């Protein structure tokens, strides 16, 4: 297992270097935080250190936004949840960390029932391999049992790389907290652990 992790890190250390094009920068702006840095490095063909440096520039500290949440911001929050910390999500969205935490807690209290829409099923297919089930319950506004039953019906499984990070404690939901029975177990936003390297954006 350790050898495979080291191999992945070596692959992530190589890639294109030099000036970033406008297209690359825009793509990083759209994708950063929605997947782990090694996967993003492979996708963009840039080494992880370069990804981090450019992300720090793209999402440099600026005036914190306030007011109603736009649908696009909520969707980005859901895509980042369980991948990076709430601190990094706040930087990406240009919002205060406490506001992000409150929004996640609000999402965790919203539960849908009934038939799954096609879009929900596709989101589950897209994210199931790289998110913990508790995180997916928040993202999809479904019960934990509902997420697991649908995943079983679709015969979905977790990605091996994700399971290795999970075994190292690098990702995943943490201590369950008291929530309504239909949502147990549930985790608060600050208790969702994230990969250490992703925190580099917020330093």
Image (spheres, rainbow, N blue to C red):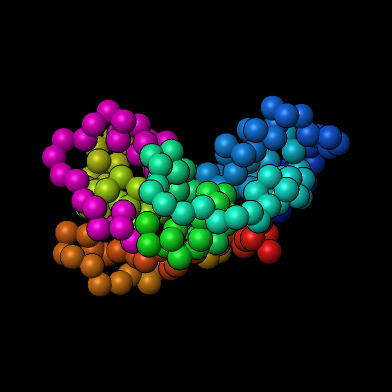
Where does the N terminus fall, quadrant-wise?
Answer: bottom right
Picture coordinates of residue 135 (x, y %)?
37, 54
Asked if residue 107 lies in the magenta stretch, the reply is: yes
Q: Is residue 40 shown left or right of residue 122?
A: right
User: Which residue is nearer to you in this view: 96 or 166?
Assistant: 96
Q: Main secondary structure of the magenta part?
A: helix
Residue placed at 46% from the left, 54% from the top? Answer: 66
Q: Is residue 117 magenta?
A: yes
Which one is in front, 153 or 63? Answer: 63
> Which residue is located at x 30 percent, y 63 percent?
186
Q: How many marks?
A: 0
- Compared across the picture, whether 81 is left or right of 41 comes to left
Give the residue at x 45% y 43%: 73
Up the image or down, 50 lies above or below 22; here it is below
| Quarter of the image where the C terminus is located | bottom right
The answer to whether residue 9 of the structure is visible from this angle is no
Q: Is residue 124 visible?
A: yes
Residue, far left: 114
Q: Read off the magenta span.
A: 104-131
> Does 198 sit left or right of 49 as displayed?
left
Residue reaching furthest to the right: 18
| Residue 132 percent across, percent down from the top left | 40, 54
Give whichever of 174, 95 is nearer the camera. Answer: 95
Say if 120 sits above or below 197 in the image.
above
Where residue 74 appears, as percent x and y from the top left, is 40, 45
The image shows residue 180 at horizontal and vertical percentages of 18, 65
């Amino acid at each position: 297992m350790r050898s495979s992790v080291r191999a992945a890190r070596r692959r992530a250390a190589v890639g294109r270097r030099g000036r970033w094009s406008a297209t690359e920068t825009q793509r990083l702006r759209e994708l950063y935080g929605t997947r782990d840095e090694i996967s993003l490095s492979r996708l963009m063909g840039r080494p992880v250190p370069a990804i981090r440096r450019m992300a720090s520039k793209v999402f440099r500290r600026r005036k914190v936004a306030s007011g109603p949440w736009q649908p696009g911001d909520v969707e980005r929050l859901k895509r980042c949840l369980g991948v990076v910390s709430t601190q990094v999500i706040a930087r990406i969205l240009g919002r205060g960390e406490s506001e992000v935490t409150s929004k996640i807690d609000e999402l965790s209290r919203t539960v849908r029932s009934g038939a799954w829409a096609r879009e929900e099923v596709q989101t589950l297919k897209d994210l199931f391999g790289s998110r913990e089930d508790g995180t997916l319950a928040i993202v999809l506004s479904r019960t934990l049992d509902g997420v697991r039953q649908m995943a079983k019906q679709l015969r979905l499984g977790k990605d091996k790389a994700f399971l290795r990070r999970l075994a190292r404690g690098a990702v995943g939901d943490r201590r369950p907290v008291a929530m309504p029975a239909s949502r147990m177990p549930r985790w608060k936003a600050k208790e969702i652990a994230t990969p250490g390297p992703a925190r580099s954006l917020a330093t």
